[in-house]
Amino acid sequence: MEDFRELLDDCVHCGFCLPTCPTYQLWGEEMDSPRGRIHLMSQHEQGAPLSGPMIEHFDRCLGCMACVTACPSGVKYDRLIEVTRAKVEDERPRGRTDRLLREAIFAFFPYPKRLRLLRGPLRAYQASKINMSPLLNRISPTLAAMERLAPPRASHVRLPERVAARGERRAVVGMLTGCVQREFFPGVNAATARVLAMEGCDVVIPKGQGCCGALSLHSGRAAEARAFAKKTIETFADVDVVVVNAAGCGSAMKDYGDVLADEPEWAERAREFSAKTRDLTEYLAELGPRATRHPLEITVAYHDACHLAHAQGIRVQPRALLAGIPGLVIREIADPEICCGSAGVYNLLQPEAAGELGDRKAANVSATGADLLVAANPGCSLQIATALRRRGEEIAVAHTAEVLDASIRGIGKEQLSPRR
């Protein structure tokens, strides 16, 4: 792993990051900008203790990596904030309430089977149409945020362990099903498997797969992230390509080489695994289209998920795939580099800031006049849809895989219904 102090020294404090940093845009506070946080990191490296205000500035960072894209000096802020958050968790015990909330979040979200247990109560609650937000807000803003962002009702989809290619086989790929994606957006996984198969891929979907560790990695839970990474590497050991349809997951998996760099028995395997990880749109662009696209007369607003656009540098491929659908029109969203406020579990732990960012993004989405919002991350979809509802608006939301699936199968735009 690179020397932390050398990474800090790469920052020349030029300020190119400021216009793209969501929290700096919200508050105009230097210590809530990337270069300000790097200054705080340097102070800590020089012996300053982790004070409460210092930790608050680190916690307020979304980890959106817009600053990485903007930086002319190539500062690896993504590595800096990950290491710093791990130090915070190791060196400064959190207060009882904060600790319990974080433990509750991480006791469920990275574990699909546990998330599945929430499906029944969630369906009953949503069917009751009881508004618990005022009460929950008094108890905890985090609990109120969980209620507002509760995923839509969805029927469970059981995917086979292997989906055969249609026509002549072009490749064999592994597919990550994820945690929130698997349990609350199963239609995205089903569409992903179908699209890959219709494009000539045998799709291997290991039954025993679990969390990739993205939420843990981005929240400073380093040991937990390493354990999830090792299991994921072992799970997909027998495939040459691993396709991912959630931006945050793909970003974390491409970072395994750094995550496990200090463990000699895992370092090389981790680097090889990262090299074979592909976002769905990235892989489809590499593979090239074979299946016929049927017309979809629809206008879509494409949202750049931060961990796809900034962390993975994938912007052109999803737009090109959507543009290849006859009849489909893409409308760009203003200020695409500014995060929607989802950022893993940020919208649960920092609900006020996340809400402001969500409202800004929702206003920009609404201004496009599009029929459909397309996003590559389940958290983004939930965050923006929730913000639009606060405006009294509703829009259909879909993953790129679902739009491609609808076009290739010729089932029409009616299948791309709003997620409530």
Image (cartoon, rainbow, N blue to C red):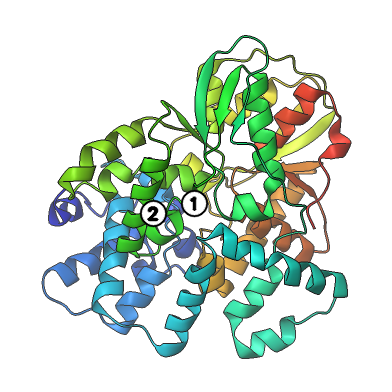
**Nearer to me, 149 or 244:** 244
Image-based side of 205 in relation to 75, left or right: right
| Residue 66 located left or right of residue 398 | left
Task: Please tell me which residue lies in front, 175 or 30.
Answer: 175
CA gap, disc 1 and disc 2: 8 Å
Residue at left offset 62%, top offset 50%: 182
Query: Could you tell me which residue is drawn at 45 percent across and 59 percent down?
Result: 215
Where residue 129 is drawn, which disc sits there? none
The residue to which callout 1 is attached is 210
Q: Is residue 21 something one can see in this rendering?
A: no
Disc 2 marks a residue whose amino acid type is Phe
Is residue 142 in view from this perspective? yes
* Amino acid on which disc 1 is placed: Gly
For the C terminus, which image quadrant? bottom right
Which mark is drawn over residue 228?
2
**Residue 351: x and y, percent?**
57, 73
Question: In percent of the image, x 51 and y 22: which residue is there?
Answer: 172
Q: How many marks?
A: 2
- Number of residues whose C-alpha sits closer than 10 Å to that of mark 1, classed few (under 14), some (14–19) or many (20 or more): many
SS at badge 2? helix
Q: From this view, report whether residue 33 is shown above or below residue 244.
A: below
In the displayed structure, 344 sits above or below 334; it is below
> Upstream in the sequence, badge 1 or badge 2?
1
Residue 274 percent location from the top left of the image:
35, 36
Looking at the image, residue 413 lies above or below residue 98:
above
Q: Quadrant of residue 179?
A: bottom right
- SS state under label 1: loop
Classify 10 Å Cα crowding around label 2: few (below 14), some (14-19), many (20 and above): many
Above or below residue 27? Residue 189 is above
Residue 399 rendering spot, x and y as whole percentages: 67, 40
